[in-house]
Image (cartoon, rainbow, N blue to C red):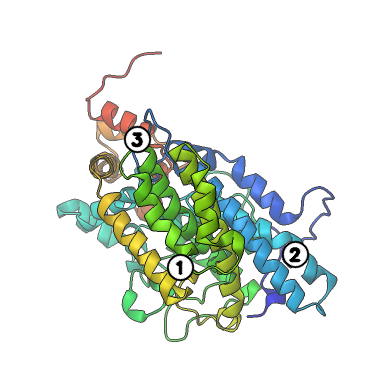
Amino acid sequence: MNWASLYTTQRTGDAERKNTGNDLVRNSFLRDYDRIIFSSAFRRLQNKTQVFPLPGAIFVHNRLTHSLEVASVGRSLGKAAGERIAAKYSNESEGFREFYRHELPYVIASACLAHDIGNPPFGHSGEDAIRAFFNGLEGDMRSRIHDSLNENQRKDFENFEGNSNALRVLTNSFNEPEPGGYKLTYTTLSALVKYPCSSSAGFNKKTGLIATKKSGFFDSEKDTYRKIAGLLGIPFKEGYDDVYARHPFVYLTEAADDICYRVIDLEDAHRLHIISIETFMDMFLPFFENEKEVYNSRTYIEKKLANINDDNQKVQYIRARWIGLMIDKMSNLFMEHEEELLNGTLEKDLLKCLPAEDHKLIDRINDFSVKHIYNYKAVVEIEIAGYNVIGGLLKEFVHAILHPGLPKSGKLIKLVSPQFPISKDENDMYKNIQSLVDFIAGMTDLYAIDIYRKITGITIPEIR
């Protein structure tokens, strides 16, 4: 791969030789950002769980606020990395330097904005609930589905992944005639796909490839990603089926997410009085211990903290300084690993490229978060609710498409939005199940609970 061929203004659904119109106000990648932020799929993230249950008396992050903050950090990372690339390759064309100095920040911000757009309700437990349902199929339901789907199609559901679903949400037109979905640039989409492999090739850590840690595209979007990879020169991983090297820009998108959730989850925990201000400071101040720049030194930061009265303000100050520090470190690491990035051989995220001292501190945050935040009672309760609600919805709706002649089945199918068409043809089993998963994964937490209660008779709907 080379920096000059890793970007394009070509969009999904565009004719191959379509000329991009000049827009004096918005470049192609800022238009990507706008298309995402004004979409209904993005707006629905405001009622999808990040970690802590929604809603509550104390504000905590939801998927939407998290995505906005990741986009902000991603924009800064794109700017820092882009400036370095433009400066290093100053003999390249004006268009090259224009892209890396002024347009790459919008590419990374757009990819960050959309990175959770495919996630179902109830946080990561929503993904687990979908996987658990399809892995636990029994009897006639299991045999009929397994007989109708090939292995990769089956794995799309058994290994359901929000990252793969994000690509589907953004590129699929569903029941609309115009192709291309949101019609985003291939560049933005390539910066989004963290695990560029199929569902059957993914979830395999034995390969040692970062691409197969999870998965990045369903069977239905395989050709879409092949087209993106072909145009941008993203190579196959030799010896594997449907596994690609990562696009270098993905590392910046991933770094922005990694930076944000590690500090934001702890900030939310502090607001909810799960952890103390002392614990928060103990987690993040050590990162500044050996910083040589005066304004990044621990001594300077502790002096500033001494002049802040409110503990929440102290947390916000530390969060801001830590994010700034990590942006600088990640953009430096991005260029230090330039050769591996372009060769497609960097098999770890940028956070894991930190010096040993910093990496130990990150591991400490990870361990603490798992023990005291992700296993906190309220978090576990929402995860269990997710299993029951999503599992219950899938059971009802999948049974309906397998037995369309039953009176109840016809009524259930009428509840599915028309944008997710259900066919009575048994040969359309894969498409029908995808439509159901599209419908359920797109729900907000509250809507999923509401419709589950109504179809199971827990709540009797009011006539309006």
Q: Secondary structure at mark 3?
A: helix
- Above or below, 248 against 72 in this view is below
Quadrant assignment, res 202: bottom left
Q: Are marks 3 and 2 in contact (CB under 8 Å)?
A: no
* Residue under the point 64% across and 53% down: 183
Residue 211 seen in the current view: no
**Residue on which the image places disc 2:** 101
The tag earlier along the polypeptide, 3 or 1, is 1
* Residue under the point 50% across and 60% down: 298
Instruction: Compute the Cα span from label 3 to label 1.
Output: 28 Å
Numbered badge on residue 448 = 3
- Closest to the camera, between mark 3 and mark 2, is 2
Neighbour tally class for label 1: few under 14, some 14-19, many 20 plus, Cα within 10 Å: many
**Residue on which the image places disc 1:** 195
Residue 464 screen position, x and y as percent? 41, 13
Residue 250 screen position, x and y as percent? 55, 66
Q: Secondary structure at mark 2?
A: helix
- Residues 163 and 251: in front is 251
Q: Secondary structure at mark 1?
A: loop
Residue 419 screen position, x and y as percent? 49, 40
The tag earlier along the polypeptide, 2 or 1, is 2
- Above or below, 186 against 373 in this view is below
Neighbour tally class for label 2: few under 14, some 14-19, many 20 plus, Cα within 10 Å: many
Query: For the residue marked with disc 3, what is the amino acid?
Result: Ala
* Residue under the point 40% across and 49% down: 265
Residue 319 screen position, x and y as percent? 50, 50
